[in-house]
Amino acid sequence: MNKLKSQLTRKFFIQYIVSVVLWIVASVVLTILGVIVVTSITWQPGIVWDLITLVRDYFPLFYLLFLFVGLGIVTYFSIQKPIRYLNEMSESTTQLMSDPQKAIVLSDDLKIIQDQLNALRMESLANQQQADEANQRKNNLIMYLAHDLKTPLTSVIGYLSLLHDEADISESTRKHYQDVALDKAYRLEALINEFFDITRFNLSTMEYDNKMIYINRLVEQVIYEFKPMLEDHGLTIDTHMDPDIYVNGDGNKLSRVMDNVLKNAVNYADEHSVISLDIKKEDPNMVMTITNTGSTIDPHKLERIFDPFYRADASRASKSGGSGLGLAICKEIIEHYGGTIHADSCDHLFILTITLPLVEPMDQNKAEASL
């Protein structure tokens, strides 16, 4: 933009100087021609001769007046072009806000600005479309969750009512009713938590701390907490970590990342399969790879799994289906600390790769590892 501004300024200045020089030359030529014409004619006394005499007597004054009037006209027409360009840019800005669907067309000299404004227009339209799609996904998700809240709640009330009303039931039947009611209550709690996740994602801004984190211990703690969920799904985690891996970050936020990515792997992994977790030092980054077996995700879905409220498994009846915020939150946290998160899927494998900048601890005893 600054380069174009300099180019236009130089162009307008050169055009103005050329116009002024041409007018000065033209005024001299016209004056000479005027003198030649006047002296070649025999004039009779009268108004015309009186005017010629007046001009001759005050020639310097009339010449300067003639010269400056011409310069004024040249200046006026010279500034009309940049003013017209300014008006074009002003109108294009208004159009960009009021009618972004319409392409912006400017003068040839403003083609660079035209291209930049059209690129901005297309980016704005794409962002608006993404926002609309995210909002629609959120609204659909809320509608689905609100509908699905009824099912576990109805089951909890139904089985608790049976326990309350039927006094003479066997212990095994009672335990069965209690187990079902508890399972539905947990499902109800999960759905309510998803509502809270949606609210927090829309209404709050994450606050970040920045401490030295001992990744090895943090990962071990999170994996230990996943043991009950792993056993329920018949899964095991095969872990390989380079020793003494440290990064800067917030222990709670990075624990949330680990929790989300492992929960995603557990929910969508084939039962009785192995989840692979590898963490390596690849200077200057820590590279974490989580691999699980499962359905291959289509490329067009894979590109959007980090979008808020997007679920590659769109079935709302899926027990494992969440709010579609887990990986979006992971992306926000990881990128805040200068890292990257990327997903691949092929041959019934889902591979999630996370990088974070490594740090060398000055005092390893100060490295935070707990939640």
Image (tube, grey):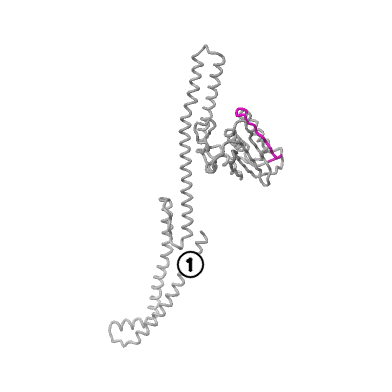
Of residues 218 and 351, the one drawn nearer to the viewer in this rendering: 351
Quick one: SS at disc 1? Answer: helix
Q: Does 134 appear above or below 57? A: above
Please give left or right for residue 129 compared with residue 271 in the image: left
Q: x and y percent of residue 253 in the render? A: 60, 37
For residue 42, which quarter of the picture?
Answer: bottom left
Q: x and y percent of residue 280 in the render? A: 68, 42
Residue with the mark numbered 1: 11
Magenta segment: 231-245
Number of marks in the image? 1
Q: x and y percent of residue 38 in the render? A: 34, 84
Q: Is residue 242 inside the magenta stretch?
A: yes
Q: Does 221 appear above or below 125? A: above
Identify the residue shown where x is 48% and y is 46%.
Answer: 127
Of residues 102 and 334, the one drawn nearer to the viewer in this rendering: 102
Q: Is residue 40 inside the magenta stretch?
A: no
Please give left or right for residue 159 compared with residue 83 in the image: right
Please give left or right for residue 322 compared with residue 93 in the image: right
